[in-house]
Image (cartoon, rainbow, N blue to C red):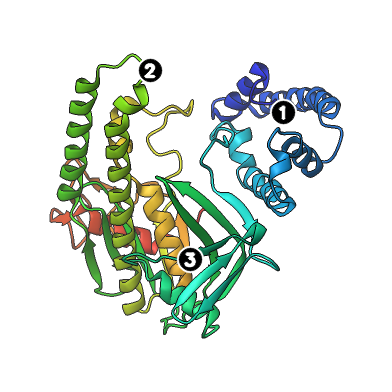
Amino acid sequence: MRLQNDEYVKCQSKLVSKSISKETQKDIKERMKEIDKELLARKAEIAQKSPLTFAYRAIKDSHYAKDLPSDIFNTLKQDVFKHFNETKKEQLRGERSLATYKRGIPIPFSLMKKNVIVSEGDNYYLTWFEETRFKLNFGKDHSNNRAIIDNCLKTNKYKLGSAAKIQLKNKKLFLLVTVDIPETKNTIIKGKVMGVDLGVVHPAYLAVNDGPERSLIGDGDAFQKQRDVFRRRFKELQRCQLTQGGHGRKHKTKATEILRGKERNWVQTENHRISREIVNLAIRWKVESIQMENLKGFGKNSEGEVETKHKRLLGRWSYFELQKNIEYKAQMAGIKVVYVNPAYTSQTCHVCGKKGDRTERDTFICLNTECSCYGKPQDADMNAAINIARSKNIVK
C-alpha cells in the first residue's frame, strides 16, 4: 500500500537526496507518519486478523485447498511470511518488488513424523503424504549430495533440517532439503585479513593486509567472451522466431528459454568455482577474515536508476551472487566476512594512502613524490585489493 501511494514514494526519494536541509527532512518524515496512519487504518479494514492468520486464511480459501495436507498449509504460510519479513525493508524502500508465487514453485513441507528420509541398504527413500514413496536418485552427483545425506543419516556428522521442499521442473521431481553442517576448525593468524577486489578485467584479485600473499582468480576475458557468445546466440534465436504471441508462442520461445537456462547455469558454476578457490586460499593463508567492498547501489544515480554507462556492465557482472557464495563458504570454514566502504579503494596508493592516477583501467600510478612507488605503474586490481584488506571503514 505504501508503494502504491505516490506521495509516500516521492517522500522516500526526497529523503535520499543529500541536498535537502534537516528541517525539510523532519517535515517529510512527519508527513510520512501521517500517510502511514491513514494506510494502517485501511489495512485494518482489509486484514482484521494478525498477518499470519490472514495469510493462512488466504491460502485456505483457495479452490484447491481441500486437496492439500494441513502440514503443507502451515509450512507454506510460514515460508511466505518469513520471506516477506526478510525483504520487508527493501520492499518499503522500493528496491525490491513483492514476491510472486506462480505455478511451479517448490512445495514446502516439514521433514517430521510422517515425512522422513529412510535408508535401505545403499538406497534412500522419502516417505511422503498419503503413503507416497520416492526413491532418491543422485545422478552424476557433482555436488556430492549422497555423501551429505550419508553424514546426516548414517554417521550423524551433519544434521538434517526440518524444512524441505519438492519442486517439479522439466518433468522431474527435485527434493530440496536444508542441512546443518558444523563449521570447520582451521588455524588462523589473528589480525590477518584478505582483501577481495571484484572486477571486470579480473573476476577477483586477492591480497592480505600485511604479507606478500597475492593471487589472481579467474580469467575476465574468457568470462566475457563466453557471455558474448550466449548474447549472440540469443539474438539469432529471437530473429528466427518473429512471434507476436497467440497459439504456439510457448513452443516458439522454447529454444530461447533453454538458452537462458544454460547461460544461468554456466554463470552459477563459474561463481561457485571462483568462490571455492577464494575460500581455499583464505584457509591456506590462515586469514582471520575476508573483506569485500559493499557494492550496493553501484552504477545507480541519486534517483536509484542505473546509469547508461553501467547498464552493459551490470547486465553481465554477477558480483552479488559471487559475494554471497564467498560468504557462505567462508562461514563454513570458520572465516568471517566483512564489507567495507568502496570509496577511493581503487584511486589511492596502498603504500602512502594518497590519491593517484587511474586513467587506465588496469594500471595505477602514484603521484606522491615522497612515496617509494612514485611514478611506477602498479596493477590497479592488486592495489585495490590491498586497500580493501587494510580498510577500517566497515559498513554495518
Distance from disc 1 to disc 3, alpha carbons, whole Å, reads 57 Å
Q: Earlier in the sequence, mark 1 or mark 3?
A: 1
Question: Which amino acid type is shown beneath numbered disc 3?
Answer: Lys
Residue located beneath label 3 in the image: 135
Tag nearer the camera, 2 or 1: 2
Q: Earlier in the sequence, mark 2 or mark 1?
A: 1
Query: Looking at the picture, does residue 235 appear above or below residue 75?
Result: above
Of residues 176 and 126, the one drawn nearer to the viewer in this rendering:
126
Distance from disc 3 to disc 2, alpha carbons, whole Å, reads 38 Å
Question: Which amino acid type is shown beneath numbered disc 1?
Answer: Lys
Residue at x-position 30% and y-position 72%: 281
Quadrant placement of the C terminus: bottom right
Q: Earlier in the sequence, mark 3 or mark 2?
A: 3
Residue 131 lies, in percent from the top left, at 64, 62
Residue located beneath label 2 in the image: 247
Distance from disc 2 to disc 1, alpha carbons, whole Å, reads 51 Å
Residue at x-position 58% and y-position 49%: 107
Question: Which amino acid type is shown beneath numbered disc 2?
Answer: His
Residue located beneath label 1 in the image: 29
Left or right, 132 with reference to 187: right
Secondary element under disc 1, as helix, strand or loop, is helix
Q: Quadrant of residue 243?
A: top left
Secondary element under disc 2, as helix, strand or loop, is loop
Residue 335 lies, in percent from the top left, at 45, 72
Residue at x-position 39% and y-position 29%: 306
Left or right, 172 with reference to 98: left
Secondary element under disc 3, as helix, strand or loop, is strand
